[in-house]
Image (cartoon, rainbow, N blue to C red):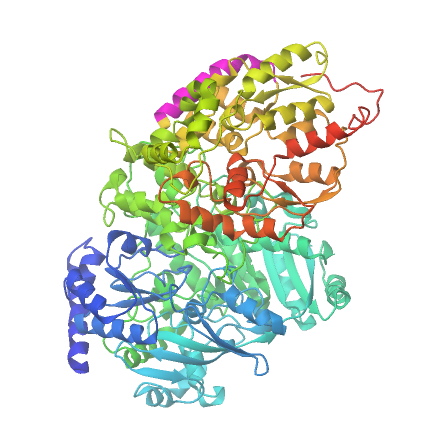
Amino acid sequence: MAERDTRNLRDARNAREATARAADGASATDAATDAAPATEVAAALTAAVRGEVDFGAAARALTTMDASNYRRVPVGVVAPRDAADVAAALAVCRTYGVPVVPRGAGTSIAGNATGLGVVLDLTRHLRSIVSVDPEARTAVVQPGVVLDTLREAARPYGLTFGPDPSTHSRCTLGGMIGNNSCGAHSVAWGTTADNVHELSVITYGGDTSRLGKGWDGAPAGARELVESHLAPLRTGFPAGLPRRISGYALDALLPEAGTDLARAFCGSEGTLGVVTEATVRLVESPPARALAVLGYPDESAAAEAAAGLLPYGPLTVEGMSEDLVRVRGDGGHGLPRGGAWLFVETGGTTPGEARAAATAILRAADALEGTVVADPAGQRALWRVREDAAGTATRMPDGTEAWPGWEDCAVPPARLGAYLRDFRALLAEHGLRGTPYGHFGDGCIYVRIDFDLLSDDGVRRFRRFSEEVASLVVAHGGSLSGEHGDGLARSELLPKMYGDELVGLFGRFKDLWDPAGGMNPGVLARPARLDENLRFAVLPRDRVEVAFGYPHDGPGGGDFSAAVRRCVGVAKCRVGGPGSGAGAVAGAGGGASSGPGVMCPSFRATGEEQHSTRGRARLLHEMLAGEVVTDGWRSTEVRDALDLCLSCKGCRSDCPVGVDMATYKAEFLHHHYAGRLRPAAHYAMGMLPRWLRPAAPFARVLNAAARVPPLASLAKRLGGIAPERTIPRLAPEPFGRWLGRHVKARTEVFARSRSAVLWPDTFTEYLTPSVGRAAVRVFEAAGIGVVAPPRAGRICCGLTYVSTGQLDRARTVMRRALDLMEPLLDAGLPVVVLEPSCAGALATDLPELLGDDPRAARLAASVRTFAQALEECAPRWRPPRLDRPVTGQTHCHQHAVLGDEADRRLRARAGLTGELSGGCCGLAGNFGFERGHYDVSVACAEDQLLPSVRAAGKGAEILADGFSCRTQLAQLGGHRARHLAEVLAEALQREPESEGAPEGSTERPAEGR
């Protein structure tokens, strides 16, 4: 039976290769399914495994790519529940001659996790930590365990897993074993292979083995292969190279190396078998750490200095150059003087010991300038720059795209400076630019390069450069891969590094494990060409007609394909929610806010790839490609994935490359429903401002009707509203009417004040005018005159129309607002928007939808939050002291677009202590009210917001500037949350008139500009 299965797959493989040679442009998917119809394979898998089997277009589209430049279309996806399921799936695939690719988080940068045939998703079920043994310092894990989950489990014992790639919050142990991942701490703790004791493996042929030291579990002929080729195995691998990841680690099987079969399996990139369980080594984690930050003239000088610091026993020696900091736009985070920097981390049992070790390195280093950072917050801020580099480096300083086509090579640390000089010269010779950074202490360099991968000439240059830089790496005694493996990007170039004889042994080693060639074909042995399977080849060459401007995407902006290409797959959006063990997003990756992260609330709630920012971007990519997702803008696969997008805008700030899925969703809905009937919620909540205006005079009657259960149920059913929701109450009097009366009465008092326009957003206007009245009270106490815009009830930012994709209507509403606001814009007054979601819409959606109207940019630039307006217009005002703790949440749109730094400073001056939570409240405007979204909405609230409020003391003030956040807290927990303006206004009412005045009572408030 096994012989027949092997023959079937080999025949299928030969047929595919012949087809590829004979037919230019033949579909990879067609080749992969030559052996049997996909429906037949899917039916057999469904009958054989207990886990999920999905051969649908969405599942396939989600797994066409990883974090590389490559794309291969699978025939289907299987999520096995256990090792028995893995064996059953392999048996079916073997019978039908279908290749298999094991996949973890899909963050590989070389195309390793893409593949033809069936993708095994090991993250859905095989993610348990079987045991942790603190005495033996080992842990037993399944392959889908996220690295941070293991680290959290080991933390109570003072232990950790040493290798820590920058994707530690989402990468899996199985993927790390497959790629032999390393991370920043490899100078102290080595690679994944250095930290693996034993592996349980199932081969494509169905053999189950337990691999460790010795030959037990090796396929027949492996020992003979090694013992008959001792000379090339002893001399063919470069020496003095801590980061040699390329090829198979056959030298680990030499007798003098201890014949470590598990180590040899590490880095095999899913080409030999499937890991179902691993016993890994844990190391002691220093309880205290410090960071020496050293500045050098350029990266070559930093690289040359790195090797000299290794004798001091650092935990990390990381390097980056100034062009990466410029790309990120952070102003350097207070980095020392220099054009490149080393981050050298030290550890100790006490903070003083860690700091002393860092100080010793600082004194020994021949740096232009340096500093020691001991406080954890400062260290985190610096590490965020480094960890987000895989994404931020995909944009050059001028905004052009850069790609990982030559990523993570390694040379001996002592050769790194010379290599970088030669590398820069080679870049210049080819007219290319790149941003080097990486693990300088290990001689490992990452770089994203501005290859043109869209044109035939650009692809040819990409190939020439790859061949020449491979020769350069080898000339410096290096490895083509020092972290992420060879994959599709470098496997073809392995003969340059190892020569034909050793590469031939790699092929024979692969065949011993996988004689049928079913495991991840095209990688390592018999590789695909490095310029094949590029993911950009399938995208349309002509620009797609769109409504938004996309000013930062493509030459001159407006390129939706370029916007979708922003997602490079590093998957920062795939950080799990409560119970996942992955922990919260560490912080904004280049966004407006310094607070806790937001992205991606729907993935955190569901754990499903299609509900991550990356998953949605992949589906949009395939929609544009038209091969897997074939219905274009009418695609149900894309619609369903975007359905649970909360439009929180968190990805706009937290994604290292600024993917803006809220905008992409609005764009898609605009096209998807063009000329068609929309969901009821789009008419009800998407057009909310239109309905609230005529409803306002009847507020009391409508409020009473909404409290009659049959009437409320009917209204919710007709409006597409979730039955679990309570319809919010309308205000008896709109805010604009009150504001008009109030401003008229106060005109003379504030004629000489610094003035600001108070934007009458829909939520403040018709639902919570108390927020607006409170803001006016505070502004007047601060000496700021409030200006009411004309016809306040007619002004709208268009938010609800945008979020439901009614973009033509949004434009009409926005232009009317600009017409009404134009005189105030001419006066140069700041525009204060109390509702953060409306402020975000004015700051981003308005200029991107009305890029042809210069007034849109002027209004966007005038937008201020409540705290920003106080800080700008009354910088010397002292708020009343409240001296109490706070809890609640920073609004996700404020976090993403406007930032909360001014709010933090205002709270501190008012004596409001504590941090607000990150994440999204889950209501998110119309999202949480829509039928079918209630459970996800609650799960999002339970992720961060509700637990933080419950954990706060009884005296804590609950702050939530957004109407949605306040409503969610009230409806799910009975919590009374308030806008910061309400809290300050209440305190002002309790104070004597002299309190809360500007400092220096003899000085008048600033004049209006």
Image spot of residue 551 (x, y percent): 44, 32
In depth, the one of 129 and 70 nearer the eye is 129
Residue 464, quarter of picture: bottom left
Q: Is residue 818 magenta?
A: yes
Instruction: From this view, report whether residue 97 is shown above or below residue 825.
Output: below
Q: Which residue: 54% across, 53% down? A: 585
Instruction: From this view, report whether residue 558 is shown above or below residue 723.
Output: above
Image spot of residue 737 (x, y percent): 55, 16
- Does residue 190 appear to the left or right of 64 in the view shown? right
Q: Is residue 190 magenta?
A: no
Quadrant including the N terminus: bottom left
Q: Main secondary structure of the magenta part?
A: helix
Q: Which residue: 38% across, 38% down? A: 664
- Does residue 929 appear to the left or right of 531 in the view shown? right
Can residue 477 be seen? yes
In depth, the one of 447 and 757 nearer the eye is 757
Can residue 851 be seen? no
Image spot of residue 232 (x, y percent): 40, 83
Image spot of residue 731 (x, y percent): 52, 25
Instruction: From this view, report whether residue 360 is shown above or below residue 432.
Output: below
First to last magenta residue range: 808-828
In depth, the one of 227 and 475 nearer the eye is 227
